[in-house]
Image: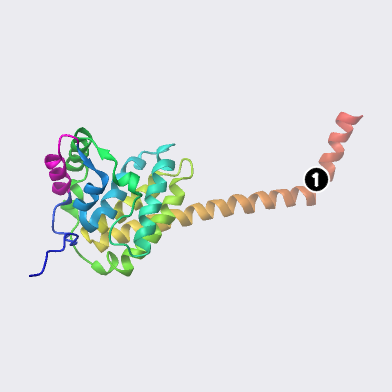
Amino acid sequence: MNQPDVHRDDPDRSFVNLVASMAREAGPDGASIGEILDRLDERAFGIMILILAIPCLVPALYGVPQIVGVPIILLAGQMLVGRREPWLPDAWLRRQISTEWLGRMADFADKRMRWIERLSKPRLRLLASGAGERLAAGMMILATLTIILPMTNSVPSLGLALMAAGLIQRDGVFVLLGEAVALGWVIALGVVAFGLAFGATWAVSLFDRVGGQSVMDGFSRLFGG
């Protein structure tokens, strides 16, 4: 008799209800991170990245994006190489999450993440699985690198949240929207950086070519007599 796949990817299951059931069924000491990952099945990648990205949506936030950026890159990197489940060091897996914190996480999911299940559904799965999932993982890493920069967290975090939601629900539309936001933001930052670098170089060149020597002569006369 075939055993059921405990890590079966079923986007029709409510991930919000899954988080709530973890809180209800946790023992008095809560649950370990390893136990939580086992319950989240293959969608653990998307759910964990979404939970990490949502706080970074606060504009001009400093400190938190720089901290959560590391685990986001770690998780996205594992998706990029095709892992089915997140890998974390044994010390992290053994760490206990209290029943109180699990309850807060379930309450947050119910109040802040239920909209994802209402708006998304399995569609264009090619963009949310297999090679499409790996492409999204690469875009997540790119977006996270811009989150780490000061004052640039909100827009790429939105892209991350949309991509994570798409992977959770196997919704290629959400994934595509998230990739467009992330790529657009990276291009915009690149254009600004290029403009600043080119503008500074042009200004220095113009200074040297047109007025540099005259200005230096003026300072020399003013301060040197």
Side of 194 relative to 184 (left or right): right
- Residue 112, image x, y percentages: 22, 42
In the picture, which quadrant includes the C terminus? top right
Give the camera-side residue of 135 and 201. 135
State the residue position of label 1.
212
Give the camera-side residue of 10 and 162. 10
Above or below — where is 138 with respect to 158?
A: below
At a point 20% along the width and 65% down the height, the residue shown is: 123
At a point 68% along the width and 52% down the height, the residue shown is: 201
Q: Which residues are magenta?
A: 16-29
Which structural element holds mark 1?
Answer: helix
Q: How many marks?
A: 1
Give the residue at the far left of this rendering: 1
Residue 179 location, quadrant? bottom left
- Residue 61, image x, y percentages: 41, 37
In the picture, which quadrant includes the N terminus? bottom left
Side of 107 relative to 176 (left or right): left
Side of 149 relative to 176 (left or right): right
Give the camera-side residue of 200 and 62. 62
Amino acid type assigned to the residue bearing label 1 in the image: Gly
Above or below — where is 87 with respect to 52?
A: below
